[in-house]
Image: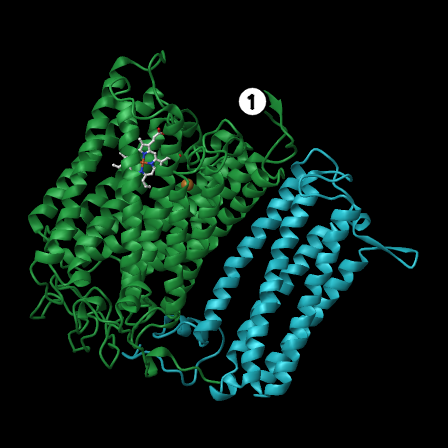
Chain colours: A cyan, B green
């Protein structure tokens, strides 16, 4: 290898490219610091959620009392029709849509389209906020109408409520933090900060976080509501 | 959008001017490192005092009645937790990681200095919360550093009122602090190296700290989750970890939870934690040995891969701490096997250290003494680890003093020796002064021999079946009188070692003011931190230009060269013996 190793000119593709990137000097990934750091953070956060979900599965199996039936507990009666899981379906749909608007915002960011980026990010944040709002509604209904408490509930195993509040709560905090984070970045987009630096990578980094929070929700949805 | 690497960019650092921004709210990685170091060592002294109190009780139960049985539990717990987390983890990663990473890879600072600064202040907060538990109603928790439920949160265990909550909160806060720092260290190593600094030219110290940080980022989540769940069990009465249980004669409201789940989560964190402490020590000790033996590290690439392999394997051995909790024999077999497999890369490292010394030009300076001492204590603790890794051997030895001796050797004494060696080694760079060599040598010999006389006899106590975490042993039939006398001896050694540490503190503080002025590179070392234009390095570390790296970190005693080391930033010549990759 030449003494000064690789410069960021042409790089070979595929496996050779990966090896060369890794054995080069200066940096291992051709990405900005913030993005690299966000990826690493999300990896760590993945471990947090994995621990939560495996713990949930573990107590669900260890508890001695039957587990309540989620599609019954999370049913709503709308106009006289009893529909299982309807609220949660809407919430999931909203969150996934927000990932769509976020992806579009990132795309417009790359094209340096300030207006469109800002608008789409506002939409994303609003979707996120409405998700949190519906979650609050869901919690209230469970607590007030169904009598579910973290330490017990009339339907079955006490761990049902414990896991539900803990895991959806922790995820809800992630969404709320995401809404705040998106709002700050939107504000900066709108102020023209990234036009001046000619660099919209902050939008993409926020997008990474947002997609991650979405993805986690899919797992929570599958493991908690569908199992 | 082509992204320009740091080394190819001009970087502007604004230099702080007021005292406050320079030394207190500082974003300079070197100042943050020192803040971490001083805080960690200060709590470490608290933990040391606690252990002295425990030893007084154990050695002379009738002469000194300084502490009550409740307090013994509290002191064991606080001692263990402080030593492992708040001293060693914080010191190796927050202290040495912060100081060494940017200097060794040729960066001006961590990639996000502000986050780095926050990391320290949040760490300080976690320490304050932990210390606060000494002053609340009921005192600190006495659950043992493993915090096993159900007893950890049931009344009857000391500190069940507030102590356990403060412990859990403090841990959570610590994890936040660690994450902020850890993300910085990892990103800096991956993304902010200088020109010519490839991953395979990095000094092993950086490799050790880097891998340990990755382990931390993946292992602390399990501790965070278990801390959250236990807090909920204690505060809201959930039953994640709590089975139906009678406590103090009354049926509690708990039911259906799984105490073993906690053990799994705790040790999924706890075992990698051992390596979070050990890997930086491995890395640093490699550099100390190579520098002071004036010889390249033996098998550099093997050393790197061993670090990575150990790091990876450390995630699949955790249940060797749970043999006595009861498990499917096939699981026991699996975890015993993985545990023994880890011994292979570890042994490779030990061989390589010894082979580095082999026919080297050994200078027995203070850092080198500590590094060689480490090899002894580590081999010793490592060998007893192989005993304990086997299920049938572990069952009778578990929860005896054999275990106490084992883990003190391997993750107490060994890393601490490296900490001392490293502080002596980098002291001239950090302060610009030389320490007193004679005092340092006394410090080494008394500490080294002293700790051996503490822990060697403990193995024997373990074989006798003397249980750990006991307040007193009088009147236990199977424990002979001689064991009690041995205990007194151990206590005398422990107190001696504790007092000897005064030598270290006096040396450090005295030399800070009156030590001989140090040159930039007093040991003739090759790594970049010794090549800074100023000593101690100023904010920004390098002059206008970042250094450029042309060789690996271990060009010592290259045949055909006039001097016995070639710094990493010296341009390549045509000497074929010099190591360029
Ligand atoms: C001179 C130094 C030290 C002395 C005299 C000492 C002494 C002790 C004593 C007396 C115990 C309680 C044993 C029992 O009753 O079960 C203990 C436990 C422990 N020590 Fe140390 N220790 C020292 C240094 C360290 C260091 C450097 C570490 C860092 C890893 C450490 C980690 C622990 C841990 C994890 C426990 C177990 C706590 C528990 O059982 O919950 N100790 N030590
Ligand atoms: Cu282990």
Q: Position of residue B63 (x, y in %)?
A: 24, 19
Residue denoted by label 1: B248
Mark 1: secondary structure: loop
Q: Quadrant of residue B59?
A: top left
Chain under numbered label 1: B
Q: Percent from the top left, x then y, of residue A146?
A: 79, 45
Viewer-nearest residue: B533 or B449: B533
User: Toward the viewer: B37 or A147?
Assistant: A147
Quadrant housing the C terminus of chain B: bottom left
Q: Nearer the viewer, residue B238 or B130?
A: B130
Q: Residue at x 23, y 75 (%)?
A: B542
Q: Is residue B448 left or right of residue A138?
A: left
Q: Across the whole image, how many numbered discs are drawn on residues?
A: 1
Point out the quarter of the image occupied by ligand 1.
Answer: top left
B233 relative to B425 in the view: left or right: right
Does the image show residue B201? Answer: no
Tell whether circle 1 marks a residue whose Cβ is less than 8 angstroms from ligand 1.
no
Q: Position of residue B163 (x, y in %)?
A: 45, 38
Q: Is residue A23 left or right of residue B379?
A: right
Q: B55 and A10: which one is in front?
A: B55
* Relative vertical location of residue B19 with respect to residue B280 in this rendering, above or below: below
Q: Residues within 10 Å of mark 1 (few under 14, many from 20)?
A: few
Q: Residue B467 appears at what percent x and percent y? A: 37, 23
């Amino acid at each position: 290898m030449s003494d000064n190793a690789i410069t960021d000119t042409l790089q070979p593709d595929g496996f050779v490219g990966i090896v060369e990137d890794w054995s080069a000097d200066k940096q291992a990934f051709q990405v900005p610091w913030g993005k690299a750091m966000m990826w690493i953070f999300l990896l760590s956060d993945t471990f947090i959620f994995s621990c939560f979900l495996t713990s949930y599965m573990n107590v669900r199996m260890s508890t001695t009392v039957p587990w309540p039936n989620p599609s019954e507990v999370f049913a709503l009666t709308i106009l006289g029709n009893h529909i299982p899981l309807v609220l949660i379906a809407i919430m999931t749909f909203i969150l996934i849509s927000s990932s769509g608007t976020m992806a579009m915002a990132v795309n417009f960011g790359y094209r340096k389209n300030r207006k469109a980026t800002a608008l789409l990010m506002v939409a994303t944040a609003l979707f996120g906020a409405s998700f949190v709002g519906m979650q609050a509604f869901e919690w209230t209904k469970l607590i007030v109408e169904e009598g579910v408490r973290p330490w017990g509930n009339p339907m079955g195993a006490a761990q049902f409520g414990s896991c539900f509040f803990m895991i959806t709560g922790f995820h809800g905090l992630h969404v709320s933090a995401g809404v705040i984070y998106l709002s700050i970045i939107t504000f900066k987009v709108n102020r023209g900060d990234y036009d001046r630096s000619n660099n919209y990578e902050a939008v993409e980094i926020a997008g990474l976080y947002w997609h991650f929070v979405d993805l986690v929700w899919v797992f929570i949805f599958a493991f908690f509501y569908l199992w | 959008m082509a992204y320009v690497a740091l080394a190819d960019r001009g970087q502007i650092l604004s230099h702080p001017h007021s005292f406050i921004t320079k030394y207190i709210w500082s974003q300079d990685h070197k100042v943050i490192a020192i803040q971490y170091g001083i805080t960690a060592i200060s709590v470490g002294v608290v933990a040391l005092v606690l252990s002295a109190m425990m030893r007084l009780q154990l050695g002379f139960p009738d002469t000194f009645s300084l502490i009550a049985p409740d307090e013994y539990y509290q002191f064991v717990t606080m001692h263990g937790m402080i030593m492992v987390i708040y001293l060693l983890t914080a010191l190796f990663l927050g202290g040495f990681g912060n100081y060494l990473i940017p200097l060794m890879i040729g960066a001006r600072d961590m990639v996000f200095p502000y986050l780095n600064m926050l990391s320290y202040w949040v760490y300080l907060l976690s320490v304050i919360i932990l210390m606060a538990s000494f002053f609340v109603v009921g005192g600190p928790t006495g659950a043992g550093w493993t915090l096993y439920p159900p007893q950890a949160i049931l009344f009857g265990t000391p500190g069940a009122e507030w102590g356990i909550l403060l412990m859990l909160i403090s841990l959570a806060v610590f994890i936040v602090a660690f994450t902020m720092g850890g993300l910085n260290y990892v990103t800096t190593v991956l993304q902010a190296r200088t020109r010519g600094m490839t991953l395979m030219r990095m000094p092993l110290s950086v490799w050790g700290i880097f891998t340990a940080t990755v382990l931390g980022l993946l292992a602390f989540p399990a501790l965070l989750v278990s801390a959250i769940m236990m807090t909920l069990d204690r505060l809201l009465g959930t039953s994640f970890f709590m089975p139906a249980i009678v406590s103090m004669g009354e049926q509690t409201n708990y039911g259906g939870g799984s105490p073993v789940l906690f053990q799994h989560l705790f040790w999924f964190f706890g075992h990698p934690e051992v390596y979070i402490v050990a890997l930086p020590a491995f890395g640093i000790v490699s550099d100390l040995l190579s520098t002071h033996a004036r010889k390249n590290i033996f098998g550099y690439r093997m050393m790197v891969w061993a670090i990575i392999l150990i790091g990876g394997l450390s995630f699949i051995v955790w249940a060797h701490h749970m043999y006595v909790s009861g498990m499917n024999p096939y699981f026991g077999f699996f975890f015993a096997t993985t545990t023994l497999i880890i011994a292979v890369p570890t042994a490779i490292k030990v061989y390589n250290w010894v082979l580095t010394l082999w026919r080297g030009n050994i200078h027995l300076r203070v850092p080198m003494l500590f590094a060689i001492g480490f090899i002894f204590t580590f081999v010793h603790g490592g060998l007893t680890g192989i005993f304990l890794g086997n299920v049938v051997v572990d069952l009778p030895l578990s929860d005896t003093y054999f275990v106490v001796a084992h883990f003190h050797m391997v993750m107490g004494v060994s890393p601490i020796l490296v900490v001392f060696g490293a502080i002596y080694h980098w002291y001239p760079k950090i302060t610009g002064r030389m320490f007193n060599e004679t005092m340092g040598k006394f410090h080494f010999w008394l500490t080294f021999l002293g700790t051996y006389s503490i822990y060697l006899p403990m193995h024997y106590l373990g074989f006798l079946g003397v249980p750990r975490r006991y307040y007193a042993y009088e009147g236990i039939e199977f424990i002979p009188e001689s064991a009690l006398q041995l205990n007194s001896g151990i206590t005398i050694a422990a107190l001696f070692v504790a007092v000897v540490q005064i030598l270290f503190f006096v040396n450090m503080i005295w030399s800070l003011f009156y030590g001989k002025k140090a040159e930039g590179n007093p040991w003739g070392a090759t790594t970049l931190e010794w090549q800074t234009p100023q000593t101690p390095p100023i904010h920004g570390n390098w002059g206008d230009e970042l250094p450029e790296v042309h060789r690996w970190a271990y060009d010592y005693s290259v045949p055909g060269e006039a001097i016995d080391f070639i710094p990493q930033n010296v341009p390549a010549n045509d000497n074929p013996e010099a190591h360029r990759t």
